[in-house]
Image (spheres, rainbow, N blue to C red):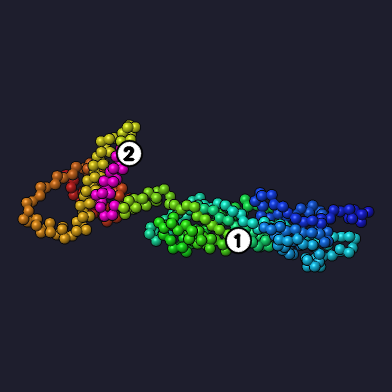
Amino acid sequence: MALMDFIKKQFIDVIEWTETGDGTLAWRFPMAGNEIQHGASLTVRESQMAVFVNEGQVADVFGPGRYTLTTQTLPVLTYLRNWDKLFQSPFKSDVYFFSTRQQVDQRWGTAQPVTIRDKDFGAIRLRAFGNYAYRVADPKRFHTEVAGTRERVTVADVDGQLRGLMLQHIADAVASSGIPFLDLAANQVEFAAQLLAATAPAFEALGLKLEAVQLQSVSLPEELQKILDQKIGMGMVGQDMGRFMQYQTAQAIPAMAQGAAQGGGSVAGDAMGLGAGVALGQVLAGQLAQGLNPGQAGGAAAGAGAAPAAPAVAPLRPDEVMATLEKLADLKAKGILTDEEFAAKKAELLKKLV
């Protein structure tokens, strides 16, 4: 009776896998107590590979093609037993299929800014976003390192791990590329190539191959971007501080008008601050012009004895001095004035208090 029960067992004679398009990377062929018949047919399609696991160890790996499973095509069968006894199938191994096609349009991005060292700005915090593509290249390693005995492994199962590997190597890629932040936007292809080279070994350790990396955007956090905009504005106006302050004043007028229309803030206070800013711009512009033209400044000093004495400048009121100091502190906070320049100007203004 036991022999008849065994003979009635269902033997598997066709082993194949048709992908369903759900992002499956590894799939275990369902045995459910069935045994694989000696001489069964194994079909591995293009973009697939199959791994046979016997007693917990990988016995063989098959690439695309059609195979007849015998002791000649699968040498491990010679170590199994009892094909010629009681019709017992010698083939009780687990069969795993792996998709080797590219998994495209996988997204990566910095959830938090990454701190890197830049040639122009020193230490900065960087945001970057893009996508990448990979495939299963070494099914045996992917099976032992990631998939294990699970019935199915999908793209979603490894997404967090792979995105973490991408972000971990951003700083290495920036350092290897040697591209300053201001040039990254114009050299996205080169930066992406460096990121691929830096991350590929980590993918390879999991049995995967990183095929492509694209960089879609790179930027600074909002507060750092404002400082960068200020530096860019200074570079655009060159050494003409007066023009820069006039530009800042023109930018402030619409905001003042809107605040007055909405009933917020004091128009008189805004006007006073605006006037102090203009005065500051004129003072800084005059000092900068003297620094750039020392000959003219010296000539003016030499002819001071012959020329009539200039009328004394009226001392500033305390509120004017305080408004000017606030403007200077704001410029120092934005990196436009150095600590030394701010301290010198502060001392000069305090002397003018009445």
Residue at the far right: name it. Answer: 1
Q: Is residue 177 magenta?
A: no
Residue visible at 40% across and 56% down in the picture: 182
Query: Which residue position holds label 1?
Result: 209
Residue visible at 89% across and 64% down in the picture: 84
Q: Quadrant location of the C terminus?
A: top left
**Would residue 176 be found to the left or right of residue 277 on screen?**
right
Between the C-alphas of marks 2 and 1, the distance is 54 Å
SS of the residue under disc 1:
strand
Q: Is residue 352 visible?
A: yes
On the image, the x and y values in percent for residue 93 come to 78, 60
On the image, the x and y values in percent for residue 166 come to 54, 57
Residue 255 is marked as: 2
Q: Quadrant location of the N terminus?
A: bottom right
Magenta part of the chain: 237-256
Which of marks 1 and 2 precedes in the sequence? 1
